[in-house]
Image (cartoon, rainbow, N blue to C red):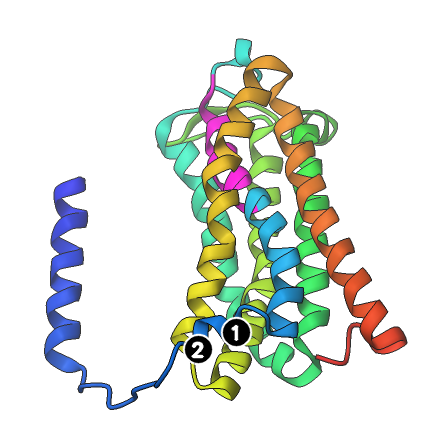
Amino acid sequence: MFTLITALMVAAWLVTWGMLDADPTRIEGFPFSDLAVNRKILTNSTFRAQYAFAVTMVRTWVPIYAGTELASGGLAVGATAVAVTVTAEKATNVVGQLFTGRLSDAYGRSLFVFAGGGAYGLIAMTIPFSAAIGAALGAGLTVPILGELPAAYLPLVALSGLLGVADSFREPASMALFADEGTDDGGVASSFGIRELVWRPGSVAGPLIAGWLMVEVSMGSVFYVVGAFAVTGVVTFLAILARDHGRAALTAW
């Protein structure tokens, strides 16, 4: 598998190198320093720094939850069934962005960041209830290739898909906020560098926190903390926008 991944990456690099024209754009000075104190970027970063914990933890722990043995709080499904839980989130995210990006251009970026981030947190908090939802619906079944599936499995796949939908509202709007400021100040690459830098602490520390919670508290606690990170992120984002723009908090940007 890793050989195939390496081959695809090398092929993609060669095609990119051979097909793309040289970029004539050159930015003088050090735009990173100006963008680092940009009002929009700072405001979006207060959300993004917290949201990074939520996304990294949930994307890592949904498949762990699906594949971990029952005694440790998981569903103990097979590898292919675990892969479906990951694919559900990715697929709905990709399809959703075909439409949500255009909507955020029309109705404002900040509204979509707030709505998508908040929905993501609330859906994540629902994941520990997959077993109860499945039991109520009688969702246990056996599927060829996937094998025997517990009642919690289909609700988990559905919730994973909803996570992808929620993040499809947030992601293009968030990227556009950074791109807009980078374009205005002449440093698009620098603005995206800040965007990635803000994400890194959560992407590194998030799995460590989730692992400790799973061992010392419970599997469900991971998703409650995930939801808390996302919700506090959007609340902070809204509070700053409300202070600066009042009732136009979610429509000014």
Q: Do labels 1 and 2 touch, CB within 8 Å?
A: yes
| Residue 210 is at least partly visible in this image | yes
Q: Residue furthest right?
A: 247
Mark 2 closeness class: few <14, some 14–19, many ≥20 residues within 10 Å:
some
Counting from the top left corner in percent of width and height, residue 165 is at 59, 58
What is the secondary structure assignment of the residue under circle 1? helix
Please identify the quarter of the rendering in which residue 17 is found: bottom left
Please indicate whether residue 73 sits to the left or right of residue 15 in the image: right
Counting from the top left corner in percent of width and height, residue 212 is at 55, 21
Q: Mark 1 points at which residue?
A: 35
Q: What stretch is highlighted in magenta?
A: 55-68
In which quadrant will I find the C terminus?
bottom right
Tell me which residue sits at (49%, 65%) in the image: 95
- Distance from disc 1 to disc 2, alpha carbons, whole Å, reads 6 Å
Q: Mark 2 points at which residue?
A: 31
Give the amino acid at mark 2.
Answer: Pro
Counting from the top left corner in percent of width and height, residue 133 is at 71, 31
Using the image, determine if residue 107 lies above or below residue 5.
below
**Residue 209 or 151: which is nearer the viewer?**
209
In which quadrant will I find the N terminus?
top left
What is the secondary structure assignment of the residue under circle 2? helix
